[in-house]
Every structure is written in structure tokens, then in C-alpha cells.
Amino acid sequence: MTVRRLLAGLGSTALVLGACASAPPPGSSEAGIPGQPFTAPDVLDAMRDSTRPGGVPPELQTDAIAAAVAEQLWTFDGRPWNSLAAGGSCGGDACTLELAGAPDGAAGEDVWVFSVAPATGEVAVATADLHGVPADWITTLDTMARDAPGSEMLPDLTLTAVRWQPPPAVGRFDLAYRTGNEEESCAVDLVLDAAGGIITELEVTGC
């Protein structure tokens, strides 16, 4: 059974606090304010230099598509990744373009997948799996979540994944907690507003 709820009375507060800036977890010297450091030429070069099997289809390697992608590509702290890896595929009139990389000191990698219509140049974010959170933030984010109202189920669970949310959500993180690797194990997924130290969404499955 899955129970999903928006914690009453907290959602509007999180929006106000999160809109100001992404307040760093206590003890961190980084602001963690998302930015868009990659230009259209950066994206185009990544597509042309792709080392992924099959590379990137030629129909995606245009100035217009690269510019549209650059306008929607964010990094956790506004700095470029050490490397920008690209891959893509097309089927019929639809294509996908994947861009991935990680900032220095990150706990994981950011993976952006864009849906592209080469005929019109339309580009949209299909998925954003963003694990490029500083490794030294993970413990603090976990502590903040466990100390927040509504976290009563977390003491017996282990933090297994942390993702950051891109704008317009600023300063919010998706945290996943599990009891184990079993398919039917207890799972709690939540959204933490780091600026306010509050949980704004909570989903419980199999607990």
C-alpha cells in the first residue's frame, strides 16, 4: 500500500523559503545555487565528440537544438561539470538526447534526458535524475530530514538516495529511505526543503 501526502501547513512556507536561495546545510561553505554554465557551443561540441555507442544522431547536432538544450540544462551550483557526456537516439520523428556529468566532490552524477523533435526544433526535458549533490552534504541532509516534523518513520530506515531538484524548485531535495533491498521492503520517499528544514511531501510504501 502506498500513502502519499503533502504535509499540511508546510507547503506554502517551503515555497517562500525556497524561492529566496538554496541555503546550504549547516557547516557547508557552498551556496549550492543552481545555474546554467553550458553554452550552445558547449552542448554542440559534446554531441559531436560523443564517445557513447552510436554517438549522437546528426539531426540533433544543430545550433538551434544545442541552444534550446543549453537553456534548460542546470547544474547544482552553477559551475560546469568536469566533462559533458552526450548520447542520443532517434526513432521516427522523435529523438532523445542524454547529457550527463558531475561537479567536483559530488556524491553522484547528474543525468538529463531531453525529448527532441528535429523537424520543429522543439526540445523538452523528459527526465532529470540529479545526484550531483556534494558528498559532504549527505549526512547533514539526512539529519535535517530525521529532525523534521513528520519524520517519525525514519529511525529504522536507511538513506539510500539523494537527488536535488532544479528550478523553479530551489533548495529542495528528494530523499529515499529503505529497510533493505527486498522488493516488498518498507520505502519512504520525501521532499526536504533545506532552507526551512522541513518535509513538504512524504510517500510511504509497504510499511
Image (tube, grey):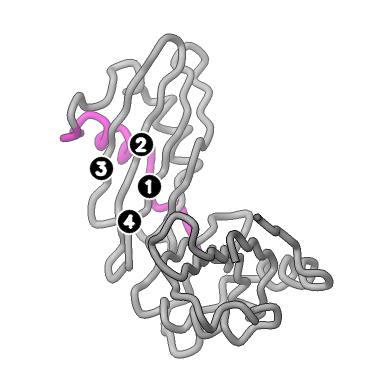
> Residue 192: where, in percent of width, then height?
60, 71
Please name the amino acid that badge 1 sits on: Val
Q: Amino acid at mark 4?
A: Glu
Residue 199, given in percent of the width and then of the height, sits at 66, 73
The residue carrying mark 2 is 98
Earlier along the polypeptide chain: callout 4 or callout 2? 2
Instruction: Left or right? Give the position of 186 relative to 133.
Output: right
Q: Which residue is mark 3?
A: 85
Report if the CB atoms under discs 4 and 1 are less than 8 Å apart. yes
Of residues 145 and 47, the one drawn nearer to the viewer in this rendering: 145
In the picture, the disc for residue 109 is 4
Alpha carbon of mark 4 to alpha carbon of mark 3: how far? 11 Å
Q: In the rendered structure, which segment of residues is drawn in magenta?
A: 33-52
User: Is residue 92 within the magenta segment?
Assistant: no
Residue 25: image location, x then y, percent: 50, 82
Number of the front mark, 1 or 3: 1
Distance from Cα at disc 4 to Cα at disc 1: 6 Å
Report which residue position mark 1 lands on.
Answer: 111
